[in-house]
Image (cartoon, grey):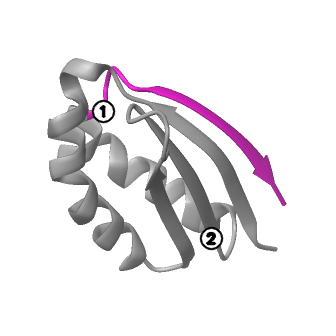
Amino acid sequence: MTVTIKGHIRVPVEALETIKMHLPAHIQNTLNEPGCLKFQVQQDALDACLFHVSEKFEDEQALDAHQNRVKSSQWGAVTKNVERVYEKFE
């Protein structure tokens, strides 16, 4: 059963440029993960510190693997102070 995550991240203004610099690699690394069906992160048109997130994985195991990889990645380090608001749909 596929798992979909939708929501947003809110980036502290002082971290915005660093986040934007690392985002393309994070997106590509995620899209290369086994079980990743969709991964989009888009900066809001009006609020530069808000990024809309949409993810879809083959199953719960693929999502777990993604979350574990992120925790130990460069992206995980640079986004440690980012507010994450997600909903999960199965």
Taking 10 as reference, is 59 above or below it? below
Residue 35, compared with residue 90, is above or below; it is: below
- Mark 1: few/some/many CA within 10 Å (<14, 14-19, 20+): many
Q: Nearer the viewer, residue 42 or 87?
A: 42
Q: Is residue 10 left or right of residue 77?
A: right
Q: Residue at x 41, y 49 (%)?
A: 68
Residue at 68% x, 51% y is: 6
Compute the Cα span from label 2 to label 1. 21 Å
**Disc 1 residue type?**
Thr
Q: Which residues are magenta?
A: 79-90
Where's residue 32, x and y in %? 36, 79
Point 25% across, 63% down: residue: 24
- For image coordinates 41% across by 76% down, the residue present is 31
Mark 1 element type: loop
Within 10 Å of disc 2 (Cα), the crowding (few <14, some 14-19, many 20+) is many
Report helix, strand or loop for mark 2.
Answer: strand
Which circle marks residue 79 in the picture?
A: 1
The quarter of the picture where residue 57 lies is bottom right
Q: Tell me: residue 82, above or below residue 71.
A: above
Lower position in the chain sequence, tag 2 or tag 1: 2
Residue that sits furthest to the front in the current view: 46
Up-down relation of residue 48 to residue 62 (above or below): above
Residue type indicated by callout 2:
Phe
Whether the magenta-drawn stretch holds residue 82 is answered as yes
User: Which residue is labeled 2 in the image?
Assistant: 57
